Image (cartoon, rainbow, N blue to C red):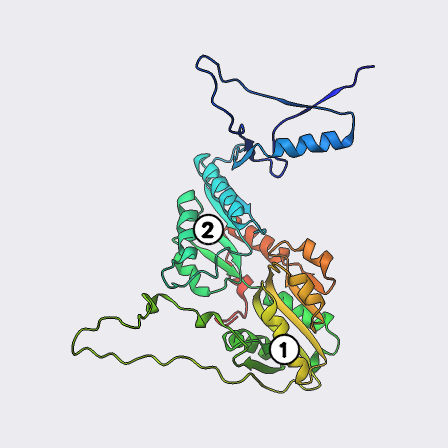
Amino acid sequence: MPKKLLLLPPLNPYSAFRAPRAHPAAPPAMNAARTGYRVFSANSTAACTELAKRITEAFCFSETRVEIKESVRGQDIFIIQTIPRDVNTAVMELLIMAYALKTSCARNIIGVIPYFPYSKQSKMRKRGSIVCKLLASMLARAGLTHIITMDLHQKEIQGFFSFPVDNLRASPFLLQYIQEEIPNYRNAVIVAKSPDAAKRAQSYAERLRLGLAVIHGEAQCTELDMDDGRHSPPMVKNATVHPGLELPLMMAKEKPPITVVGDVGGRIAIIVDDIIDDVESFVAAAEILKERGAYKIYVMATHGILSAEAPRLIEESSIDEVVVTNTVPHEIQKLQCPKIKTVDISLILSEAIRRIHNGESMAYLFRNITVDD
């Protein structure tokens, strides 16, 4: 009995929106007509089929294509987009989806982006650019009319947009987790791993009626230490100076030896921040707190990006538990490190969507929220 042939279309299964492109080949003959092609695979063995799939995947151009399958004319459309490791692909999908909805005559296009990408690039760096502002402009041109997000890295980012931005807070959910899931939390102290995080830590401490500690010293490398546009172009040793012009020289920073301002001895230390990405600074802070007498250490943040070797470093560190919300997908990291816990914040996002669609006030979602939260 003859064996069947298996037809494998040259399509990358990664996304339903991706369109294939023929692989570049030798130029055709002068009179040869360009025609489509198909790749067939014999199915004598599973290995043959797997090899054929890998071959056809190499032909994909990975363009994103969006087609709206139903009428959206005159409707409020909410696009939910989480940001995976491939940030740029997620951004392009969001832009193309928004533009497709705009050209389909949607009334309002609201982006639900729990973690706003490029939010760390919201300040001018040496010969750099404010990428976050560029992204805000691109989203507006693509057709977005409103954004729902959570815990922007810098609250000033809201000023980059030409349309409303609702910056929701995850702190009520994290505070509830502390009260319900951390035994003897009354014996805890809230810790800022750098002076930059002190306001956030102070807000947590005041709401929980707990003590506050701040780690300060040369082991910490903060975002404010990076060069910004005010120092561009950089100083040149033999630069030509206009005669008679002598400007005062800015003294170089020199951080003091690392210190912990506050008592953590015999306490539970809870480090709070907005983003956990590269965890080296959190691991170093945990080691210092252990040396100062803290007997249990928690790390809490809104966005758990947890890139690179973060799960392994957390597992091998003095940190007892890392608590993040589900604004960013991190299921793989949780499998690699059982210390990572997740707090669900979908309830506040769904309520925000309902209120915006019904034209209701959003003030209820910002009860007792201050500028420092």
Circle 1 residues within 10 Å: few <14, some 14–19, many ≥20? some
Image spot of residue 309 (x, y percent) = 64, 61
Query: Is 6 situated above or below 282?
Result: above
| Viewer-side residue, 204 vs 324 | 324
Whether residue 175 is visible? no
Residue at 67% from the left image edge and 69% from the top image edge: 176
Image spot of residue 160 (x, y percent) = 39, 57
Image spot of residue 90 (x, y percent) = 54, 46
Residue at 21% from the left image edge and 73% from the top image edge: 241
Q: Earlier in the sequence, mark 2 or mark 1?
A: 2
- Write down the residue under mark 2: 146
- Write down the residue under mark 1: 208
Query: Is 196 situated above or below 329?
Result: below
Circle 1 — which element?
Answer: helix
Task: Left or right? Give the position of 238 relative to 190.
Answer: left
Circle 2 residues within 10 Å: few <14, some 14–19, many ≥20? many
Query: Is 87 situated above or below 127?
Result: above
* Quadrant location, the N terminus: top right
